[in-house]
Image: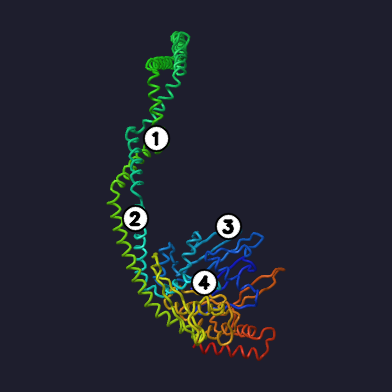
Amino acid sequence: MLLNLHVKNLALIDEADVNLGEGLNILTGETGAGKSILIDAVNMALGAKTARGLLRENGEPAGVELLFSVSGQEKEDALKELGVTVEEDGSVLIARRMSRGKSICRINDETVTVSKLRAVTALLIDIHGQHEHQSLLHKTKHLEILDAYAKVREQHIKGKLAESYRVFSSAQKELASFEMGEEERLREMDFLSYEIRELEQAELVDGEIEELELRHRQMVNGARIMESLAKAIEYAGGETGAGDFLSRAVRELSEAAHYDEGLSELLAQAEEAEGLVGDLGRGLSDYASDLEFDDRELLALESRLDLLHGLQAKYGSTYEEMVQALDGRREKLMALQEFDERKQKAKESYERAREEAYRLAGELSQIRNEEAEKLTVSIREALVDLNFLEVQFSIEFTELSHISANGTDEIEFLLSTNPGEPLKPLSQVASGGELSRIMLAIKAVLADSDDIETLIFDEIDTGISGRTAQRVSEKLNDIGKSHQVICITHLPQIAAMADCHYKIEKAVKNGRTVTEVTKLTADEEIEELARLLGGAAITQAVKKNAREMKELAKNRKD
């Protein structure tokens, strides 16, 4: 149940804090007072796209918070599967903060994505507005409604069908991969055989390319390397090199150390340096004597590198990638060699998967047909309650030529609102006002099986008045016995049925027009009903009529 709605800095609303109650919550107000802004605020908190016009030009961020109470272990488990833990007091706080170009969503103070926000709130609240009752014109919506009504019986079979359809689709794709002519198959085998031979004959060795590239750099720069080595040997160990000068330094320090013991440490350093330079000179000489640069070796090395670089360009830049390419081509060749046998197995798997998927689809269709009979009766009774006195309602089934994860059924709601008229699709017979009542009838029927506790109705009173409005109010009251209902209305018949009544009105504060929401007392409810009844002139007779209407509504509730 939605306990509290808090809105800040959204369009005309500076700040509104609405504590909502159980049963039927009614919101009324003059046209343009801002009733639609509250619905926009709720939609914003549920993750819907927000019109830029609702955000303020001064850059103030808009914020909406919805505080829900959650009851029932099943609902808690469903939320837990989505990663949401209900607080110890049974509450869940949904919050969304928006500024131009930026949106932050939170659930119980944890930042979440918009997609997760939508998934969580879909378990908690359902908004019915003009867009939804217009969706009744589309047949896909009709199947959704039937499945929602029959979900207890359907959920097990639908889960099995979804998995079966996944297997079927996979088998179908596998079989389609064998749609290859014999000539194409042989051509593909020849090409794969060529690539396999090319890779096998290369006799790839891990690390070989890196070693060859290092040796190649050494060989193509041989003259420069030898020249540099010769100079290094001269500077380190020649007659005028570092080694000769260090030897002289050692002799001089050795003689001086006879007279000054303080030089002994420096002498040791000089002797160590002399040894290091000597070792360096010998090492350079040995390295130079071992170097060989053979033109024939260079040509062979370049030929091997050209081959390996060519293979890298075709099959992968590393040894591992080229080995994987070889293994993959061997597997493909084997598959093509066993083409007929594999194709037969794929066909058998496809036939089994298809048979199982269609069997489950048939079971689902049988359940839908059985539940459709019950749903037809229930919706017709609900329509009669909503003043469709001579209504006929039916659900027509059509079997699709293809299967999906949702089976093979397509259904359509048919309606006749006048005696003697044939049943026709809703899109051909229902007006805007009738569509809203039909959706209300459907919501009333689904209420018993629907575990969403909070329902919001906007524009449910479109195109209705008089006795029909009274019937709509009674139906909303009936739904309110098992659900929390929030309804925006202009009609006194509906407003009179309120368990909690809120007035939305404009006011001027600090030179600025703002929207305020106030919960009405019993006396204020009568005043608001009188306004809805009497318009500009609210006489004592109108007020009396308002009291009588409220009393009649109370008697109906009791």
Q: Which residue is mark 3?
A: 102
Q: Amino acid at mark 1?
A: Leu
Is there a contact, CB below 8 Å, between mark 2 and mark 3? Answer: no
Q: In 3D space, how far apart are the residues under numbered discs 4 and 1 (Cα atoms)?
A: 59 Å
Tell me: 34 left or right of 203: right
- First in sequence, mark 4 or 3: give its number: 3
Which residue corresponds to the image point at 61% horizontal and 68% vertical from the top-left?
15
- The image shows residue 289 at horizontal and vertical percentages of 38, 15
- Mark nearest the camera among 4 and 1 is 1
- First in sequence, mark 2 or 1: give its number: 2
Q: Which residue is mark 4?
A: 135
- The image shows residue 471 at horizontal and vertical percentages of 53, 85
How crowded is the residue under tag 1: few (<14 C-alpha within 10 Å), some, or many (20+)?
A: many
Is there a contact, CB below 8 Å, between mark 4 and mark 3? Answer: no
Tell me: 97 left or right of 289: right
Q: Which residue is mark 2?
A: 175
Q: In 3D space, how far apart are the residues under numbered discs 4 and 2 (Cα atoms)?
A: 38 Å
How crowded is the residue under tag 2: few (<14 C-alpha within 10 Å), some, or many (20+)?
A: some
| Residue 14 position (above or below residue 387) | above
Q: Amino acid at mark 4?
A: Ser
Q: Which residue is mark 1?
A: 311
